[in-house]
Image (tube, helix red, strand yellow):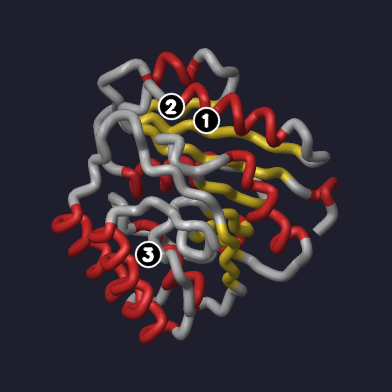
Amino acid sequence: MDNDEILLSVIIPVFNEELTISNVIDRLKSVLKKEDFRWEIIVVDDFSTDRSLSLSLNKGVKVLSLKKHVGKGCALRVGFSKSLGTLVTTIDSDGSHRPEEMPLLLTPILENKADLVIGSRYLMKTSTKVKRFNVLGVQLFNHLIHFLVKSKVSDSQSGYRIMKSEILQNMSLKSGGYEIESEMLVKTAKMGYKIKEVPICFEQRTYGKSSLDPIIDGFKILMSIILAYMQDR
C-alpha cells in the first residue's frame, strides 16, 4: 500500500473521560505527525456528562456529539459512517492504549500482510495487569470464535485495532455496546479477510470508572458472537 494513497481515520469513542481524553488526543497527534500520509482524528462523544466534549472541541479534531447516551458500539458505528479513511483505527479514550504503539499495528497492513490488525494485551512477554475475571471471559470468547470461524486470536475483545475500510463497507454492524469488537471480528473472519495480532502494552485505567458490566455485557458479547456467525453480513 503506497503512502500517498492512505488516509487514516482514527476513531475515539468517549463517555465521561475528561481526565484522559486530552492526553490521548495530544499523543495521537504527536504520533501521526511523524507519518507521511494523511490522517484525521474523529472523537465521538457519547453524551458525556463531564467536560469530555468541551475538552475534545478545543483540540482541533473532528468531534461528533451524540444527543443521548447510546453505548460504545453505537458511537463507533457513527464514527465509521463519518470517516473518510482508506484505513480505520479504533482506540479507547481512557488511556489504557498507547498511541505510540500505533505504528506496530500499522506495519502488517502497510506490508499487505493483514486486512485487520488487533493489538493484543496477552502477547506481551512481560505481564499485563488485567483483572482475572476479564481474562477468563476473553479466553471463553476466543475459544468460541475459533470454534465457529477458525480464527485463532488471543484478545478478541481488544478495542485497539486498524483495518482496511473495505471491511466495514462490506458488513452491516448492529451492536450497540462493547460487543461490537466480537461482531466485527467474526464477520471479518467469515468474509475471508486476513487477521493478525501484534503485542501491545495495556495500562489498566487509573482514572474514572469503567461502564462495562462483566455479567450483562459478557452475555451480550456471547450472543453477538453467535448472531454474527449466523448472519450473512
Q: Quadrant of residue 175?
A: bottom left
- Residue 189 percent across, percent down from the top left: 50, 76
Left or right: residue 220 compared with residue 109: left
Q: CA distance from mark 3 to mark 1?
A: 24 Å
Dot 2: what SS?
A: loop
Crowding at label 1, few (<14), some or many (≥20) Cα neighbours within 10 Å?
many
Q: Earlier in the sequence, mark 3 or mark 1?
A: 1
- Residue placed most toward the observer, 23 or 91: 23
Q: Which mark is residue 13?
A: none
Mark 3 or 1: the one toward you: 1
Q: Are marks 3 and 1 in contact (CB under 8 Å)?
A: no
Q: Residue at x 32, y 32 (%)?
A: 15
**Residue 140 % position (x, y):** 29, 74
Residue 107 in view: yes
CA–CA distance in space, label 1 to label 2: 6 Å
What amino acid is at disc 1?
A: Val
Residue tagged by mark 1? 24
Q: Position of residue 86 (x, y in %)?
A: 67, 51
- The mark found on residue 182 in the picture is 3
User: Is 231 on the left or on the right of 93, as rendered?
Assistant: left
User: Secondary structure beneath disc 3?
Assistant: helix
Q: Is residue 168 visible?
A: no
Marks 1 & 2, CB-CB < 8 Å contact = yes
Q: Which residue is mark 2?
A: 20
In the image, residue 213 lies at what x, y percent? 18, 50
Depth order, front residue of 3/30: 30
Quarter-of-image position of residue 229: bottom left
Are there few (<14), some (14-19), or many (20+) residues within 10 Å of tag 3? many
* Lower sequence index among marks 3 and 2: 2
| Residue drawn at 76 percent across, 48 percent down | 6
